[in-house]
Image (cartoon, coloured by chain):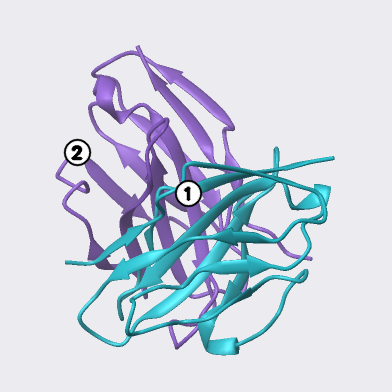
Chain colours: A purple, B cyan
């Protein structure tokens, strides 16, 4: 069964450094998402992406964040200058549609630790 | 405001006992609600969605618009039900709004 994959599984970085988190969505899916979960807190929506542009973004998704689909398979989240509070689990998801009851398929997550 | 509340962070029941995981939502429109589950060392996966009115692994959830609730129920808990359960709302946009999650532990 096709799955969303994410790399790396764990990323450790110094404050102020740039990080790129990578995701490979399910191949025939058209809608892509990033969520994050700070330890002990809710899973929070960051951004959705369709047809090579951002469809919606949350207040968290400020100028430090960007997303890209550099080729036909990868979907990346870049954090330009990481802060301590960016430490979290980042989940990528994809869906084939956005209709009623549409299922989002999640990747295993990337744990980002900012020191 | 769009919000999902799961009042219980932890819930522990004995095998064979009934289970109810509570979920309340706040949304002014017509809600789409889901239950996602995360088993140990596995990814988040959809358990069920209100629009399908389905029963998955013995679990059911009924949308109660009057009480703005979407509680997850199972009449007889099994040990393999131990997991983290998240209630989520799709507020008519391309995103999910999650509750805090409830860690369900089924004791033998």
Q: Which residue is mark 2?
A: A64
Q: Looking at the image, is mark 1 or mark 2 nearer the viewer?
A: 1
**A40 to B13, vertically: above or below:** above
**A4 and B6: which is toward the camera:** B6
Q: In this rendering, would B17 be left or right of A5?
A: right
**A38 to A58, vertically: above or below:** above
Q: Secondary structure at mark 1?
A: loop
Q: Secondary structure at mark 2?
A: loop
Q: Which residue is mark 1?
A: B101
Q: Chain of mark 1?
A: B
Q: Residues within 10 Å of mark 1 (few under 14, many from 20)?
A: many
Q: Chain of mark 2?
A: A
Label number found at residue A103: none
Residue B71, image x, y percentages: 50, 69
Residues at marks 1 and 2, CA–CA distance in whole angstroms: 28 Å
Task: Say which residue appears at 31% left-offset and 58% top-offset.
Answer: A47
**B64 and A5: which is toward the camera:** B64
Task: Say which residue appears at 35% left-offset and 81% top-offset.
Answer: B31
**B64 and A109: which is toward the camera:** B64
């Amino acid at each position: 069964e096709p799955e969303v994959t994410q790399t790396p599984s764990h990323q450790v970085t110094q404050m102020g450094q740039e990080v790129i988190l990578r995701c490979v969505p399910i191949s025939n899916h058209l809608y892509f998402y990033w969520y994050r979960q700070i330890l002990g807190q809710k899973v929070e929506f960051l951004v959705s992406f369709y047809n090579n542009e951002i469809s919606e973004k949350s207040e968290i998704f400020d100028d430090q964040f960007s997303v890209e689909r550099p080729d036909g398979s990868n979907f990346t989240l870049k954090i330009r200058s990481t802060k301590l509070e960016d430490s979290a689990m980042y989940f990528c998801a994809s869906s084939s549609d956005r209709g009623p009851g549409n299922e989002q398929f999640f990747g295993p997550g990337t744990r980002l630790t900012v020191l | 405001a769009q919000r999902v509340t799961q009042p219980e962070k932890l819930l522990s029941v004995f095998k064979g006992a009934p289970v109810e995981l509570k979920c309340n939502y706040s949304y002014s429109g017509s809600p789409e609600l889901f239950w996602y589950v995360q088993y140990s060392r596995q990814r988040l996966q959809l358990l069920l969605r209100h629009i399908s009115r389905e029963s998955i692994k013995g679990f059911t959830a009924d949308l109660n618009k009057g009480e703005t609730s979407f509680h997850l129920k199972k009449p007889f808990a099994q040990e393999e039900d131990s997991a983290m359960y998240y209630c989520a709302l799709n507020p008519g946009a391309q995103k999910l709004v999650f509750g805090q999650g409830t860690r369900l532990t089924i004791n033998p």
